[in-house]
Image (cartoon, rainbow, N blue to C red):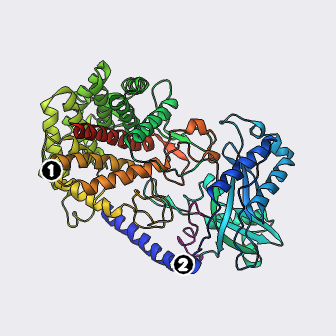
């Protein structure tokens, strides 16, 4: 199956699921009531913490009562005690919010096992126990038991499950589901990083076991329902921040600090940091993402001024030099998983050139000179690159992978900027001609686009040096394609305006927002350079930046994080993800610091 046919098949299947799910939605939709006020919510969290520490209690600023449902009883309010990101105790109570909080305090106060945990009496922010209160805003039936429809039957972050069997009740509320990544693994696909939906059959089994029965018996003899809820927690998440130069700089510095906090002494970055454990998750180390992360760290130093960031970038480059450089014919190259590839070499050049743009460094200079020689040696007559090199046979392998050619074009342009080597500029010119011309020329090529962020980052970088009408046209069309895919306010159940997707049933991922926003900043500069109208692309950029600011860990969902202090500055893969890969921070951080610098320059121009 070709890549294009595979993509069409996936989108066709998703469209069918969306159609069926829409029909199910009409029969199962929950109309939520108004949640408690922010003041009452703040009181609830403070009251629970005061109860934990035996401190004086405060009067509640009012009260709130759950709605009655079709069964003529009130859904329970669920209070959860969190121990380093783990839901260690839950307490369900039917009554008003004030009554439920007071009842939870009494229940927790009499729980000796809870008191033995060091977090129960801790006062320091990184060690103390935290609480959430999840109040029901309405209930509804389960969706039909159909493949992919069942898994999409719970609205992530908003809906959980409740069950009753022989006068006993059990709940799986949204925060507990999010802590177990239950909203992002019901359906897996062949596309990397694309999984969605909740494993509802398995969750029903969990409820059944809690109630002392099995799933089939629970469904036939018990009662199961969906619960639409509102979470009260100590930290506001997602949290709105204005897209200002000050906030963008602060976010990029927070991101760089997160990466530096978790950098290994030898220069490697923590690849995946697991928020649920507060530790590094062991996964195969990705060299292009190592170098991309190094690029962002060096950017923060050059565009903001952060000596620790420059030191971290230099350590990361020296790790490449010591452990990953190989010989590919006459040139050095970068080995990744037993092969040499263009992506690893190109992003290492990008990172090293960013270091040189601030100040000279012999290792960075050696990497730029040597690796651009390798990239040029891999160029075909039509401008495209051969993306791999066989280290054993010492010969190029003429295959192409996503991203690599765009990364290489950007690398050649960055190298030309710092070294002035005309051979790099010419190679970039020919490569860009292929990428934005014959390389994307097929029936329907003006109506469908792949992940072209590195291509348009390179096109913007080339302005004034390689002025190509094809590149301008290509990136403007790519912007228009993504503008149609970008969510506006109210188009989904979540606060994801500025994200990208094809419908309101799957929570959009954040990494494409970062990478595409990076590219659209350079597209903005390219369009501005050529005198084109930039109003719409500017709006798209700032919606994307707002989405990234909203979901970063600053401080994030602290009750779900094993180490909230260590997590500060991280960027999850999506609103339902509790892991942070280094490139999640890199793409968002690069977009933040680049737009902050654009705002600085434009303010300086306006002041003249």
Position of 429 with respect to 522 (left or right) is left
Majority secondary structure in the magenta region: loop
Name which residue lies at 66% across and 36% down: 125
Q: Is residue 147 within the magenta segment?
A: yes
Q: Can residue 1 be seen in this view?
A: no
Crowdedness near tag 1: few (<14), some (14–19) or many (≥20) residues, C-alpha within 10 Å = few
> What is the crowding at mark 2: few (fewer than 14 residues within 10 Å), some, or many (at least 20)?
some
**Residue 507 vertical placement versus 279 (above, below):** below
Does residue 234 lie above or below 296 as drawn? below
Q: Is mark 2 on a helix, strand or loop?
A: helix
| Residue 274 screen position, x and y as percent | 57, 42
What is the quadrant of residue 473 in the picture? bottom left
Residue named by callout 2: 24
Q: Which of marks 1 and 2 is in front?
A: 1
Q: Label 1 to label 2, Cα distance in Å?
A: 49 Å
Q: Is residue 556 left or right of residue 447?
A: right
**Is residue 8 in view from this perspective?**
yes
Q: Give the quadrant of residue 34.
A: bottom right
Residue annotated with mark 1: 531
Position in image of residue 297 (x %, y %): 39, 32
The magenta span reads: 144-159
Quadrant where the N terminus is found in the figure: bottom left
Counting from the top left corner in percent of width and height, residue 351 is at 33, 32
């Amino acid at each position: 199956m070709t890549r294009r046919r595979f993509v069409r098949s996936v989108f066709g299947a998703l469209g069918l699921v969306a159609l069926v799910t829409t029909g199910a939605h009409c029969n199962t939709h929950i109309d939520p009531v108004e949640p408690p006020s922010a003041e009452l919510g703040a009181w609830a969290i403070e009251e629970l913490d005061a109860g934990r520490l035996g401190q004086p209690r405060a009067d509640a600023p009012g009260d709130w009562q759950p709605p009655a449902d079709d069964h003529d009883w009130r859904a329970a309010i669920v209070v959860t005690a969190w121990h380093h990101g783990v839901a260690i105790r839950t307490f369900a109570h039917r009554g008003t919010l004030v009554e439920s909080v007071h009842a939870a305090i009494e229940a927790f106060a009499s729980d000796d096992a809870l008191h033995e945990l060091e977090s129960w009496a801790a006062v320091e922010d990184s060690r103390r126990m935290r609480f959430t209160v999840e109040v029901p805003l309405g209930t509804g039936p389960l969706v039909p038991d159909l493949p992919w429809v069942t898994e999409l039957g719970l609205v992530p972050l908003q809906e959980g499950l409740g069950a009753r069997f022989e006068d006993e009740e059990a709940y799986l509320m949204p925060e507990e589901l999010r802590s177990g990544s239950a909203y992002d693994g019901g359906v897996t696909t062949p596309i990397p990083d694309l999984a969605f939906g909740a494993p509802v059959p398995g969750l029903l089994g969990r409820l059944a076991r809690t109630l002392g029965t099995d799933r089939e018996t629970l469904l036939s003899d018990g009662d199961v329902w969906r619960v639409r809820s509102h979470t009260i927690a100590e930290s506001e998440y997602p949290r709105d921040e204005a897209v200002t130069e000050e906030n963008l700089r602060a976010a990029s510095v927070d991101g760089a600090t997160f990466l530096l906090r978790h950098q290994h002494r030898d220069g490697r970055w923590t690849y995946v940091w697991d928020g649920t454990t507060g530790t590094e998750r062991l996964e195969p180390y990705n060299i292009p993402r190592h170098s991309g992360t190094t690029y962002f760290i060096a950017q923060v130093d050059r565009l903001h001024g952060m000596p620790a960031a420059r030191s971290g970038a230099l350590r990361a480059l020296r790790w490449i030099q010591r452990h990953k450089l190989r010989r590919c014919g006459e040139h050095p190259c970068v080995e990744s998983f037993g092969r040499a590839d263009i992506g690893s070499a190109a992003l290492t050049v990008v990172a090293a050139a960013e270091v040189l743009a601030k100040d000279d460094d012999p290792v960075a200079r050696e990497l730029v000179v040597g690796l651009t020689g390798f990239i040029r040696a891999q160029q075909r007559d039509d401008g495209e690159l051969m993306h791999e090199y066989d280290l054993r046979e010492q010969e190029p392998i003429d295959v192409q992978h996503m991203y690599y050619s765009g990364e290489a074009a950007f690398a050649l342009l960055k190298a030309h900027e710092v070294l002035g080597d005309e051979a790099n500029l010419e190679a970039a010119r020919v490569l860009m001609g292929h990428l934005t011309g014959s390389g994307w020329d097929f029936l329907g090529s003006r109506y469908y686009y792949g992940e072209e962020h590195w291509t348009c980052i390179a096109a913007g970088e080339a302005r004034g040096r390689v002025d190509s009408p094809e590149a301008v046209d290509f990136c403007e069309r790519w912007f228009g394609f993504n503008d149609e895919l970008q969510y506006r306010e109210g188009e989904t159940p979540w606060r994801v305006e500025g994200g990208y997707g094809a419908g309101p049933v799957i929570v959009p991922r954040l990494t494409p927002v970062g990478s595409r926003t990076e590219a659209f900043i350079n597209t903005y500069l390219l369009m501005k350079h050529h005198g084109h109208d930039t109003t719409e692309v500017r709006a798209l950029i700032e919606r994307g930046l707002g989405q990234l600011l909203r979901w970063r860990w600053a401080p994030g969902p602290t009750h779900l994080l094993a180490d909230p202090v260590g997590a500060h500055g991280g960027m999850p893969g999506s609103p339902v993800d509790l892991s942070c890969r280094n490139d999640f921070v890199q793409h968002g951080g690069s977009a933040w610091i680049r737009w902050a610098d654009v705002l600085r320059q434009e303010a300086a121009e306006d002041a003249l």
